[in-house]
Amino acid sequence: TVKKKQKIELTKEQGWHSEQELVELGWSKNKIEGAKAKCKALGESHARRNEYDGEEEFWVTTKEMGKKTESMSFEEMHQQEKEATGEPNADFGGPMFAMLEADKTRADKAKDTKLALPAPQSKGAQTRDAL
């Protein structure tokens, strides 16, 4: 599996600027006229009069910066199947497994000797010892 990821970040510096401020920023006359035309076409959201001196201002982008990052990852998975032969080997060693093995051996011996347990008595049965 191959995964490719792209991320693009764009940072814009924007603000209200008068024609004179744009000249001070080094904008050409042609660029200023283009910005003014676009801002006026967009309406009040991009063109206004300054509330203090009444000078016409335009909402313009003065600087754009971008950052692009790419990453790629590669993942390879393998799966192998094999038919089991014989009994599984559960000999993992260690004291806990030795204790389990001893319990199993003890249980096997108990089955072989068939311990004789007394037969259960009914509730109403009386024995000579009980009388």
Image (cartoon, rainbow, N blue to C red):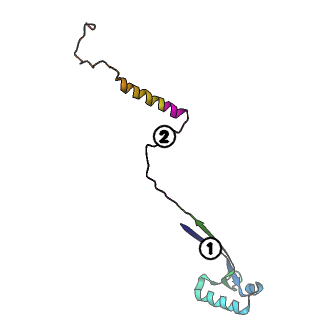
Q: Position of residue 90 (x, y in %)?
A: 48, 40
Q: Residues within 10 Å of mark 1 (few under 14, many from 20)?
A: few
Q: Residue at x 63, y 91 (%)?
A: 37
Q: Position of residue 51 (x, y in %)?
A: 67, 80
Please determine whether, in this image, residue 98 is positioned above or below residue 117: below
The residue identified by callout 2 is 90
Amino acid carrying mark 1 in the image: Ile
Residue 65 horizontal side relative to residue 80, left or right: right
Q: Which residue is mark 1?
A: 8
Instruction: Give how far across and how far down residue 96 sits, in percent.
Output: 52, 33
Q: Residue at x 22, y 14 (%)?
A: 125
Q: Give the spatial CA distance, label 1 vs label 2.
A: 54 Å
**Residue lying farthest to the left in this orientation:** 124
**Residue 123's spot in the image, x, y percent?**
24, 18
Q: Using a 10 Å C-alpha cutoff, classify the residue at mark 2 as few (fewer than 14 neighbours), some (14 to 19) or many (20 or more).
A: few
- Is 83 in the magenta? yes
Judged by its main secondary structure, the magenta piece is: loop
